Amino acid sequence: MVPSLACPNICVAVMAAGGIPLIVDVSSLDGNISTNAVKSRIDASVKAIIAVDSFGYPADLKTLKEIASPYGCKVIDDACQAYGGSINGERVGCLGDMGVISFGYSKPIALQGGGLLIVPNKNALNGILELMRTNSNSPVSLFKNWLSLNLSLSSKYGLFKFLTNHGLLNYNFPEILKQKLHMTWQLFEQDLPAVKSNLKKAREIISTLNDIDTFDYIDGDWLPWRYSFMITSGETQDRFLRLSKKLHIKSSRLYKPLNIVSNKFLFRNPYPTSPSKNIFDSIFNLRYATTRNSTNQLIEKIKSFRKFW
């Protein structure tokens, strides 16, 4: 199962593994996969649920695991848009049966490629390594040069641990990229408290603007990949774009809902969702780098934006 509002690469990965994506609805409250939709559509044929932490806000992994458990279904915490955030003291990416994050373009840690696979124990890690070793023609092995493996040990806070001394970080991961990753990750963690504080300030300012709606997110220690909000009026959208361009505020839209592009893939039972279409038609994302300086600049630009709005 994959949410209808997500990067199409998720479906490509499912098909590369020999599966068939089953698109399910998202919640209009936060854009994450709807637990009610999952509950109504799950059966014994569903092997995994990919729970994308959309826009940086954690999906309801606890409920999803409760729904999936009777069917022997695994839940994958896709924290590519959210890592650095946490919920109930646990870091996102560590909340499912396994987790993934990305180091791709514009992500919180951007290396223009690569990623992190988070597994719960050494047995799971060894199983993955064995699969890659013994199946040289498998889809998994094709990505091994860009695959970074990390063992997330169980702890109170579920912290990420780079255990390179145990050979758990990389599998043919280029050494120069590994060094850059360590350096970038250290700076990322160093700036994290200030970045989160700045983004909360940005949210408070944006929530005061007329004709702009924010998602009804739960309060938490979150880290949005891009700050997202909704503008339903076409006239107001045009106004926002003109003002953003004038003030040099970077913004973007979003992927098309997967059910809209599903005729280009071999999806099973494409689900025509209303919430995902509504979100797609009205969502805007403010872009920034997850650094103290970048988010400081974002706040100043939003303050200027408020004056003209």
Image (tube, rainbow, N blue to C red):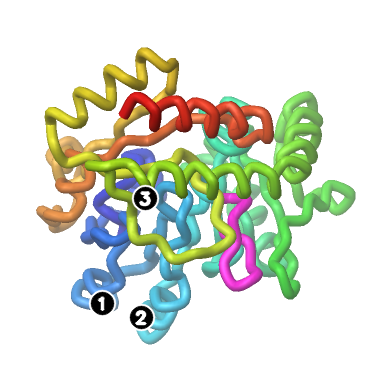
Classed neighbour count for the residue bearing mark 3: other residues with Cα under 10 Å, few (<14), some (14–19), many (≥20) = some
Q: Residue at x 45, y 67 (%)?
A: 75
Going from N to C along the chain, the mark reached first, 1 or 2, is 1
- What residue type is disc 1 on? Lys
User: Which segment did they paint magenta?
Assistant: 83-92
Classed neighbour count for the residue bearing mark 1: other residues with Cα under 10 Å, few (<14), some (14–19), many (≥20) = some
Going from N to C along the chain, the mark reached first, 3 or 1, is 3
**Residue 138 seen in render:** no
Residue 295: x and y in percent read: 59, 34
Q: Along the line of sight, which residue is nearer the eye, 207 or 169? A: 207
Where, quadrant-wise, is the C terminus in this rendering?
Answer: top left
Q: Residue at x 29, y 61 (%)?
A: 29
Query: Cα distance, mark 1 to mark 2?
Result: 6 Å
Residue 102: x and y in percent read: 55, 41
Going from N to C along the chain, the mark reached first, 2 or 3, is 3
8 on left or right of 305: left
Are the two marked residues, 1 and 2, in contact with CB atoms closer than 8 angstroms?
A: yes
Q: Along the line of sight, which residue is nearer the eye, 40 or 210? A: 210
- Please tell me whether residue 86 belongs to the stretch shown in magenta: yes
Q: Residue at x 39, y 74 (%)?
A: 64
Instruction: Name the front one of labels 3 and 1.
Output: 1
Classed neighbour count for the residue bearing mark 2: other residues with Cα under 10 Å, few (<14), some (14–19), many (≥20) = some
- What residue type is disc 2 on? Ile
Residue 51: x and y in percent read: 41, 60
Q: Which mark is residue 67?
A: 2
Disc 3: which residue: 14
Instruction: Name the front one of labels 2 and 3.
Output: 2
160 on left or right of 282: right
Residue 244: x and y in percent read: 36, 21
Disc 1: which residue: 39
